[in-house]
Image (cartoon, rainbow, N blue to C red):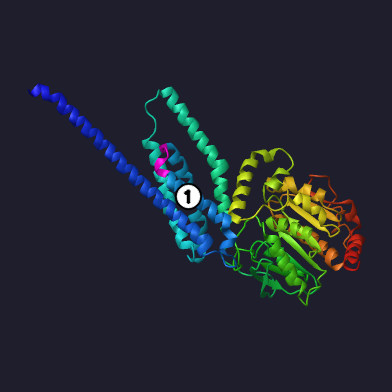
Amino acid sequence: MTGSLAPTFDKTRSTARFFGAMSRRVAAARRETTVAVAALVMIAVHLLDDSYVQPEPGTTAADHLASGLVPLAALLAFASAYPRLRAGLRAAIAIPLGVLGIVAGVGEAGYYTLQVGPSGDDYTGLLTIPAGLLLVGIGATTLWTTRRRDDRLHRRYPRRLLLTAAAVVGGYIVLFPLALSYVFTHSARAAVPPAQLGAAHQDVSCTTSDGLTLRGWYVPAKNHAAVIAAPGRAGSQKQARMLVRHGYGVLLFDRRGEGESDGDPNAFGWAADKDLNAAVAFLQHRSDVDRNRIGGIGLSVGGETLLQTAAESDGLKAVVADGAGSRSLREDLARAGSNKWGEIPTSLVITAGTMLFSNQAAPPNLKNLVGRIAPRPVFFIYGQHDQDNVRELTPGYYANAGEPKAIWEVAGASHTGAIDTQPREYERRVIAFFDRALLGADASAIAGAHTPENPPTGVGSPGFRVGAGAARLGRSIGQAERKRVNP
């Protein structure tokens, strides 16, 4: 009797264990789904808060349609489909989203909290950090607990190695650049630096064509000429002090989304032409400035945006672009040489991400714009050890620019480091350039390009070279500008 009942008892116990295991798996899946969806909701709440509830000063919800709705739609789609997705796919989506959540929290809310203290949407932004950690943890746990162990070893480990390699490549080419594009469009210098301009300054403001208020400093002119130093109030103070010593009025201001200015940040300066046009208009209405004696000196992205502004309007009468390089895929594709091809994939993602998160298209290729600046003079400066994109693009900008023009490759200098590497020569050449362009002083070929200490050099050689027309700069600039002012 007992023997006949044993198989039935064992079968019943096996069935109970089976259903018990199934029940535990279902409960675990429900807990995983609940935690994952909660994390996704926390990130979505910050997106809503950042884009629509508490947007940056001077902006409205309508300015953030793409940057808010597209990520929200992606989060909603993933949350609704989560329970039905295979484990591997769930993890493959959850981990990148978690990383982006962490980057958004640290790069935006965390940064501003450390710099000036939390405010506005920083509180919901800080929540994206634990939310991102949860998603990464869930994804990693899912990958580990659902890994295949029923295949042969000679297939298992090569497959895992290939999957790991694909994840690393995908992270480098897609995830990392996308995260950077978010930070570049959501974070900027938070505080106003101390003013060290070498003279008393005025606190001023100007209004852009899209209604943003930009705040900055202005040192009044002593020679009726003024120069905009860009970008921002931090990195260009050395150039500002140099110009002030020679009597120039100097305007420095926080870019949109930076310091005390309104608007959304954009590290590439995609909308900075509007800021610069507002700065030019401000100077044109100053009683101490002749409206035909306004120039600009820009470092890195400041030089790039000054070139665009000068090409698209005539308010700037002379431009010095120090370290102008690439600001999107457009310029990267125009770079000389073959070094660019390794960076094109990441540039593509950064450009696409910046377009999404900034709600605007990439600006025109500078190589196609610089020719419009003539007959106003432009002076290109870059370092011998500059960034690759700057060294490969600046000679091309020079070649496409019209006369009068000049270019100087500064021996031993890094990116925007010419003023530190050769401070006296930098001051001599830049001041002579502005003196001739804005004041009409005698500075043949822009600060004596042909001297025993500084002979003219060929393309690509450290030194200074000028275009064919720059040797006649003493005549051409004044004549061209008089024709433009008095047609």
| Residue named by callout 1 | 75
Q: Position of residue 254 (x, y in %)?
A: 64, 66
Q: Is residue 241 above or below residue 161?
A: below
Pick the front one: 425 or 393: 393
Q: Sort mark 1 into few (<14), some (14-19) or many (20+) by Cα contacts within 10 Å.
A: some
Q: Looking at this view, name the residue that lies furthest to the bottom.
A: 287
Q: Quadrant of residue 337?
A: top right
All told, the count of numbered labels is: 1
Residue at 89% from the left image edge and 59% from the top image edge: 473
Q: Magenta stretch: give its range.
A: 82-87
Circle 1: residue type: Leu
Q: In the picture, which quadrant includes the N terminus?
A: top left
Q: Is residue 460 magenta?
A: no
Q: Looking at this view, name the residue that lies furthest to the left.
A: 1
Q: Is residue 22 above or below residue 218?
A: above
Q: Position of residue 394 (x, y in %)?
A: 75, 49
Q: Position of residue 300 (x, y in %)?
A: 69, 55
Q: Position of residue 465 (x, y in %)?
A: 83, 51
Q: Is residue 279 left or right of residue 41?
A: right
Q: Secondary structure at mark 1?
A: helix
Give the prevailing secondary structure in the magenta stretch: helix
